[in-house]
Image (cartoon, grey):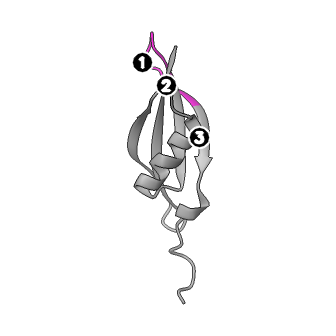
Amino acid sequence: MRAFRAVTYDVCPHESLFEAMNSYVIEKEEDIEAAAAKAAAQDVAPVVHVYQTPVEDESAPLFYKEYTFDAYTCRCGEPRE
């Protein structure tokens, strides 16, 4: 059995920023993509990385998948209306 964890990232290409914000456990009954979207909405994060961890070795998480959410993309370099 594997455990999954979603890590949200604050991203701003104008400031050269790619910084981890929060980490959320994904419950085994949750849909991984839905859990990533929920974490992104909670943190207003444009990028969420999901990691899987073998239960026998929690110190070695493996990258599973990256999700991007355009609705939360940094807009600081765009002209204001």
Any part of residue 9 in sight: yes
Residues shaded magenta: 53-63
Neighbourhood count class around disc 3 (C-alpha, 10 Å): few under 14, some 14–19, many 20 upward: some
User: Of the residues shown, which amino acid type is indicated by label 1?
Assistant: Glu
* Placement of the C terminus among the 4 image quadrants: bottom right
Residue 27 vertical position relative to residue 48 in the rendered view, above or below: above
Identify the residue at horizontal 49%, vertical 25% (top origin). 28
Quote the CA–CA distance across marks 1 and 2.
Answer: 16 Å
- Marker disc for residue 28: 2
Q: Is residue 9 left or right of residue 13?
A: left
Question: What amino acid type should be assigned to the residue bearing mark 2?
Answer: Lys
Count of residue discs:
3
Residue 79 in the image: above or below residue 34: below
Give me the C-alpha separation between circle 2 and circle 3.
12 Å
Toward the left, the furthest residue is 22
Asked if the residues shown at circle 3 and circle 1 are in contact, with their CB atoms under 8 angstroms apart, the answer is: no
Residue 16: x and y, percent? 50, 61
Q: Secondary structure at mark 1?
A: loop
Q: Earlier in the sequence, mark 2 or mark 3?
A: 2
Q: Amino acid at mark 3?
A: Glu
Q: Is residue 5 magenta?
A: no
| Mark 2: secondary structure | loop
Which dot, 3 or 1, sits closer to the camera?
Answer: 3
- Which x, y percent locates residue 73? 55, 63
Residue marked by disc 1: 58
Image location of residue 20, percent across then percent down: 42, 47
Judged by depth in the image, the label closer to the viewer, 1 or 2, is: 2
Disc 3/disc 1 C-alpha distance (Å): 22 Å
